[in-house]
């Protein structure tokens, strides 16, 4: 037998990544839903599996600072849509995805019943009344090679970047 070279070994390399975009986005939606269900004044519970320890620590510290200032937040943030921005399975710190989170917020801040909400783009201005559409770029990492996804970071995009995102009308 001459010329019997077959390349049937290529399947072993790709079998590591068994989770496709549909699975990832489904898991991310579940995580986002758990996050959105949180009261805006509450810290993330220690047993919440949908968040990394690092992000829980940062988030809870921010909530604590607001509490110390006497701030009570009222309202909700509702995710309207999620779009996968980037998936990097070979990232140095491990596989992560970034997701555009298109949302609408009615959250306002109060101290002693007085509305002290500030415009996140300009802290000198009061926050305009009514629901606000916004876009955050959320980062998720996976503790189990893509089966489940935990929120690891969330950055609110500037109005310019939001307009350039898939959330733009």
Image (tube, helix red, strand yellow):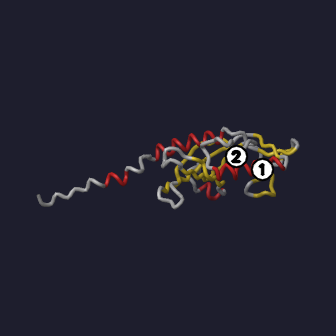
Q: Quadrant of residue 103?
A: top right
Q: Earlier in the sequence, mark 2 or mark 1?
A: 1
Residue at point 74%, 54% (across, down): 120
Residue 124 percent across, percent down from the top left: 81, 58
Position above or below: 101 against 158? above
Compared across the picture, whether 112 is left or right of 166 comes to right
The answer to which quarter of the image holds residue 156 is: bottom right
Residue 31 is marked as none
**Mark-to-mark CA distance, 2 and 1:** 10 Å
Residue designated by label 2: 132
- Could you tell me which residue is drawn at 53 percent across and 49 percent down? 142
The disc label shown at residue 127, or none: 1
Q: Are marks 2 and 1 in contact (CB under 8 Å)?
A: yes
| Residue 11 rendering spot, x and y as whole percentages | 32, 51
Indicate the position of residue 126 as horizontal and vertical percent values: 81, 52
Q: Residues within 10 Å of mark 2 (few under 14, many from 20)?
A: few
Element class at badge 2: strand
Crowding at label 1, few (<14), some or many (≥20) Cα neighbours within 10 Å?
A: some
- Residue at point 81% right, 43% down? 72
Left or right: 101 in relation to 3 = right
Q: How many marks?
A: 2
Q: Position of residue 86 (x, y in %)?
A: 51, 55
Asked which secondary structure carries label 1, the reply is loop
Q: Is residue 11 left or right of residue 35?
A: left
Which residue appears farthest toward the left when viewing the image? 1
Quarter of the image with the N terminus in it: bottom left
Residue at screen point 75% across, 48% down = 63
Q: Residue furthest right?
A: 112
């Amino acid at each position: 037998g001459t010329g019997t070279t077959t390349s049937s070994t290529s399947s072993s390399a790709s079998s590591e990544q068994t989770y496709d975009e549909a699975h990832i986005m489904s898991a991310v939606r579940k995580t986002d839903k758990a996050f959105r269900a949180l009261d805006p004044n509450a810290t993330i519970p220690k047993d919440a599996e949908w968040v990394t320890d690092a992000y829980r620590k940062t988030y809870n510290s921010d909530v604590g600072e607001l509490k110390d200032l006497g701030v009570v937040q009222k309202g909700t943030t509702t995710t309207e849509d999620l779009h996968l921005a980037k998936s990097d399975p070979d990232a140095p710190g491990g596989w992560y995805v970034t997701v555009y989170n298109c949302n609408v917020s009615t959250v306002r801040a109060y101290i002693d019943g007085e509305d002290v909400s500030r415009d996140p783009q300009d802290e000198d201005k009061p926050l305009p009344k009514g629901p606000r559409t916004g876009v955050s770029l959320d980062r998720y990492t996976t503790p189990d090679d893509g089966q489940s996804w935990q929120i690891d970071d969330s950055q609110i995009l500037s109005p310019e970047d939001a307009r350039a995102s898939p959330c733009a009308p």
